[in-house]
Amino acid sequence: MKKYFQNKRNRRGFREFLYILPFLILVAVFSYYPLYGWVYAFFDYKPPFPLSMDQFAGLKWFKSMVDNPVKLMQILRVLRNTFAMSGLSLLFSWFPMIFAVFLNEIKCVPFKKFVQTVTTLPNFISWVLVYSIAYCLLNSTGVVNSVLMNLGIIDSPQLFLQSGDHVWFKMWLWLTWKNAGWSAIMYIAAITGIDGELTEAAKVDGATRMQIIRHITIPSILPTYFVLVMLSLANFLSNGMEQYFVFENAFNKDSIQVLDLYVYNLAMGNGGYSLSTAISILKSVVSVLLLCCTNGISKLIRGEGFI
Amino acid sequence: MKSKKVLSVLLVASMTISMLAGCGGGADTQQTTDGGQTTETQDSTASGTDSQAGDSAQEGGDSAAAGDLLSIEIYDVAANYQGVQGGWFDKVVKDRFNMEMNIIAPQVAGDAVFQTRASSGNLGDILVLERADFADCVEAGLVKDISADIGNYSNLMDYKDQIDVLNNGLPGNSGQTYGIPTEMMNTSPTSYSQDVIYSSPMLRWDLYSELGHPEIADLDGLLDVLEEMMKAHPTNESGDPAYPLSLWADWDGGDGMLGIANVVQLTTWYGEKIKGSAILKADNTFTPLTDKTATYYKMLHFLNDAQRRGLVDPDSGTQDWNSVCAKISAGQVYLLWYSWEVGFWNSQERLKAGNAFIFTPVQDQLYYADADSYYGSTRVFAVGSQVEGEKYDRIMKFLDWYASPEGLTFQHDGIEGFNYTVGDDGKFTQMNDNALMDNLPVPEEYGGGGYNDGNNAINQWIVAAMSTNPNSGEPYSCQYWSTYKEATMTDMKKEWQEKFDAEEPVDYMKKNNVLLISPNVSVSLPSDSSDISVIRNQCNDTLCDYSWRMIFAKDDAEFDAMWDEMCTQMDGFGFQELYDSDVERYQIELDAKLEAAK
C-alpha cells in the first residue's frame, strides 16, 4: 500500500479520484440507491407491514396491467397521451430557436431586454400558480368570459377549463408560454458565439438580413438544436406531472393523464404502491431503449453518438 | 498554481461536508426545541433519518429531569396543520405538562408519510389513526400496550366500557389495551342528542318566505323552489352571480365512500348510506352503488336536472372547496346540505335579520343519521411503541387531561374570559363568538396570537362536544347552552317553529317519523388487501370522472349512456370483487348495529 503511494503517478491518480468521488457518491445515493425500491413491484405491499417473503407476488402486477380490455385500454390511453404531448413539444421544438433568432435581430436594446425578461419570467412561476392565474382568467366570471360577453361575442360563459377538447394543444400552449423564453437562452448564447467576421463578410457580399439568418445564423446554431432534441427524445416518456396534475379534472382526464401522472394517481390516491412501481419500471425500461435508439440514429446521421 | 490546488481541495471538502449535512438535516431540525417551526420534510431521503431522529429525541427525553421541556411527535390523521403547535393552546399544554406538540399530518404531507414512518418503525409518540389502520399498526408492533397503566387514570377510566369494547374487537386480542376511541359520549348508542342532522336540505329563510313557504313534495319541487329563488335573486347583494348549488371536486372519494362527495352526502336524504362500493338501504340490505334504482343514481340525476335548469354554478367541476366556501360566505349559494356549512353564513345578526339558512323539509324524504357516538367515531388515539419512561408517563397524563372536563372545556369552548364567561349558576355564556371565524387576537396573558392560529391543532377529541360538562350540567358544544338558545330565539326561529310545528329540525323529523337513526357500534373492520385497494382506487376514479360528466350531461339519453359506459369500465377494473369484499366487511358492522337496535 505504502509502495503504491510512493509512485508519483499513482498518488496523482488517487488525488484525482478524490476530486470525482463526491460526484460518484451523489450519483450512487440519488440515482442508484432508489432503484432498490423496485422490489415493491414484486410484492403485495401494504403499509404498515414491512416486506416479507410471504407477500412475494412475482410478476402479478405486471400481468394485471393488461388483464382485460378495460385495463389495457387504460394503459394505451395513458401512453397515447404521453406520446401525443411529448410529440407535440418535439414537433414544435424549433420554436424557441426561431424566437431566439428573431429576438437577436431586434436593434433597440431596451426593447430587446424587455421582451427577453417578460418571456423568461414565466419559467419561474410554479404550475400551481399558473393554474390559479388560468382559473382567474378563464372561470365563468373571469376576465376572458366577461370581455367576450360584454363585446357580445358569446351569450353565456364558456367553460374553457372544463372542456375536454383540444387538451393536448392547450397544454402545449401553456407549456410554451412558460418555457419559450427560458429555452431561448441556450440559443441566444449560441448566437453570440457565432464569429462576427462571417456576418460582416456576408454583409459586404450584399446579403439581406433574412439571407444572413438563413445562411449563417441558423446553420451555426443547428448543432445546439440537435443536441437539445436528442436530449428531449430520451425524455420522451417523462413529460413531468405538475402541469397535468394541476389542470386535470374529470372532464379532460381521458386526454390529459400522462404516464407520470397516472403513476402518481395510482400510488398516492389509494396506496397502489406495487402496481405503480411496476408501471414506472416499465417506463424506465422503455426510456433506456429510446435513449439507445436516438443514440443509434444520431450515430447514423451525424456520425457521432452522445453516450 | 498552488493556490488553485488548495482551492480545489477546499471545494471538494466543502462539497462533501455539505452533502453529509444535507443528509443529516432531518436529525438536526428534529432536536431543535425552540428554533421556531420544525416542519418535517417528507421526501424519500427523510425516511432513512426519521428513525434516528426519533431515537435521539427520545434519549433526550429519558435523561431529562422531570419538568424539562419535552417535545412530542403526534402522528395525526385528523390534523389539517403540520408543524409545532403555537398560540394559546400551546400555552395551555406547556403550563400543565411543559410539553411541546409537533404535529405530523398526512392530510398535509400526503399519505406516503404513513408508509415511510411505518417502515422506520416509529410512527410517532401519540398516534391518531383510522380504525382499520389502527388494527394493522397494532399487528405490526407500532402501538404500545397500555393495559398496565391506563387503570391509574381516572378521567380515561370513566370511559372504560367503550375502551374495552374497542380493544376486545381487535383480532386476536386477549385483554390488552392499545387504543382509546375518539368522540365518545356518555349517552347511549341508540339515542340522538343533536338538534340538526349531518346532512339535510337547508334553504335561506328570507328567500323561502318571499315565495310564501310553499310545500316541497319531492326533489323536483325543491328544484322549482330553487329556480324561483334564482329568478328573484340572480345575484347577491354586491352583484356577483348567485347559483342555488355550487359543487366542488376536491373531497371526492373520501371517508371510505366511493364516488363524488357532493352526491355521497345527498344519498342520506333517502335513508340510504354509502358503505364503500355498496349502498346500505333503509331495509338493512346492501345493493351495489351502480344499481340504477338506488340513491347514488337518483341524486346524481337530481344534480344533472339542476344543472340542465341552470341552477348549478358552472364552475362546479373545476373549483375547490375554498372557492365554494368563499361563495357561501358571500351569499352566492342558496342550498346547503352539510350541517356545519351554515357556519360560513349564519351569524347571530343574520339569524335576527331572518336571512339565515335553516332545514326545510322535503315531503318524500327519509333522513339517515348516525346515532350519538357512544362508542366513538372512526378514529383512535394510541401511544407509539417506542415511547418509554418519563416521556410515557407525561403522555399518559396528557391524554388523561385531554379527556378531563378541564381539558375538554379548552378543546370545545376555548378560554374562560375570552370565549365564554361562567355565571353564578355555573352556566356558560358565549362571548367573542366570531373568535374562530375572524381569528381574533388573543390577549398576551392567554398566549397571544390569533385565536384560530392557536386553536388545538390535533383537531380530534377523545370525548365529543355533545357530552355533558359536569361543571355546567350542559353539553360542551356552545350551541346547546341555554344562554345561547335564549340569544338565538329570533323571529325567524319562531316563524319556523310555528310553520313546522316543532322546536328543532330533529324534533320535526322525529315527530313526522322521517328520521332513521343508525345505532353506534364498535367493530374493527378488516383493512383492504393490496389487490382490493388498487381496484377501489381505479373504480373510484372512474366513478368520480363519469359522475362529474353526468352532472353536465345534456339530456337523459346522454346521462344513461354515460352511466352504462361507466358500469362497463368499473366491471373491467374488478367492481364485482370490490363489492363482494365490501359487503362482507360491512355485514359485520350491520349485524352489530341490528344487535344494538334490539
Image (tube, helix red, strand yellow):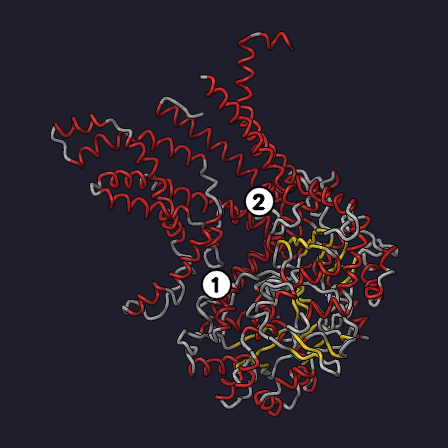
Query: Residue at position x 17%, y 28% from top?
Result: A200
Indicate the quadrant where residue A159 lies. bottom left
Residue position for label 1: B319
| Residue B140 in sight here | no
Disc 1 residue type (three-letter): Gln
Q: Are marks 1 and 2 on the same chain?
A: no
Few, some or many residues within 10 Å of mark 1 (<14, 14–19, 20+): some
Residue B9's x, y, as percent? 52, 23
Image mark for residue B94:
none
- Relative vertical location of residue A252 with respect to residue B288 in this rendering, above or below: above
Residue A155's x, y, as percent? 32, 71
Chain containing mark 1: B
Image mark for residue A66:
2
**Mark 1 or mark 2: which is in front?**
1
Q: Secondary structure at mark 2?
A: loop
- Relative vertical location of residue B39 with respect to residue A18 in this rendering, above or below: below
Chain containing mark 2: A
Disc 2 residue type (three-letter): Val
Please state if B521 lies on the left or on the right of B350 as rendered: right
- Relative vertical location of residue B457 with respect to residue B241 in this rendering, above or below: above
Quarter in which the C terminus of chain A is drawn: top left
